[in-house]
Amino acid sequence: MKSLWSEEEASGLSGLKQLVYQSRLVGADPSLVVWGGGNTSLKVIERDFRGRECRVLRVKGSGTDMKTIQREGFPGVLLDEVLPLLERTEIGDQEMVDYLNHCLVEPDAPRPSIETLLHAFLPHASVVHSHADAILSITNTQRPEALLSEAFGGRVVAVPYRRPGFLLSKEVAQAVERAPECRGVVLLNHGLITWGATPRDAYEGHIELVSR
Ligand code: ZN
């Protein structure tokens, strides 16, 4: 699998436009995501309605398709309102959705992805999550851990299957904290997460692991 990133096309783009560009590259490949699947994000500094600087997570809206996503497809979530959730031990899906609604930068924005906390809890600026066929072909087997270690060595950490939501997000954050040198997280029977300081880094990290 080859990186489709073109520095010529992307270099003049702002951070958010690079997020759109990156997401469309991921969305264009059906071996990474099918319609509506997967999600991407970027943490940026923005000004709120009173002009105060705040940390904002721009994350894919729920049910939006990445192949054709536009700037409006990325609702903004106030990161400093979301991060205290890491201290919680459990939050139900509905409570999580209601809570995130309170954290929206634009109150009428599309609902942020159900996997928003997964992006928020990782410290990296740019995060890409897909349901890559290549990764699932390893995890949907009788011995995923052995095959993962054969393919990736210590480059990725595996997190057992759990339905997307608060607990999975917290487990991913804890797994990365325990293995700070890893390049990605494999969600067993689910997909792959990579990250980077820029949308390009997170995308190319993803392509590199899927290729491998
Ligand atoms: Zn997913």
Image (cartoon, grey):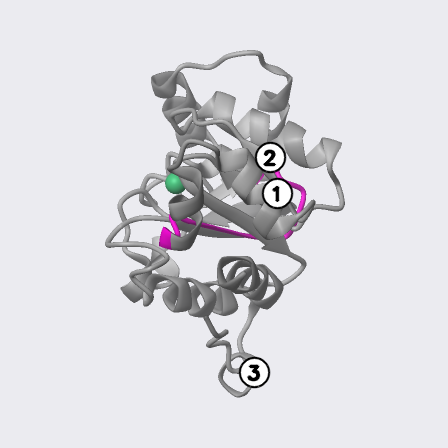
Where does the image place residue 70, in percent across and percent down from the top left? 34, 64
**Which of the two discs, 1 and 3, labels the residue nearer the N terminus?**
3
**Crowdedness of circle 2 by 10 Å Cα count: few (<14), some, many (20+)?**
many
167 and 51: which one is in front?
Answer: 167
Q: Is residue 154 magenta?
A: no
The residue indicated by pointer 3 is 7
Q: Is residue 139 above or below residue 14?
A: above
Is label 2 in a helix, a strand or a loop? loop
* Quarter of the figure with residue 71: bottom left
Region in magenta: 119-133
Residue type indicated by callout 2: Phe
176 and 20: which one is in front?
Answer: 176
Which quarter of the rendering shows the N terminus? bottom left
**Is residue 44 visible in the rendered structure shown here?**
no
Residue type indicated by callout 1: Ser
The residue indicated by pointer 1 is 149
Label 1 to label 2, Cα distance in Å?
25 Å
Label 2 to label 3, Cα distance in Å?
29 Å
The residue indicated by pointer 2 is 121
Is label 3 in a helix, a strand or a loop? helix
Q: Residue at x 59, y 60 (%)?
A: 205
Question: Mark 1 touching mark 2, by CB under 8 A?
Answer: no
Q: Nearer the viewer, mark 1 or mark 2?
A: 1
Q: Nearer the viewer, mark 1 or mark 3?
A: 1
Is label 1 in a helix, a strand or a loop? helix
Q: Residue at x 40, y 52 (%)?
A: 74
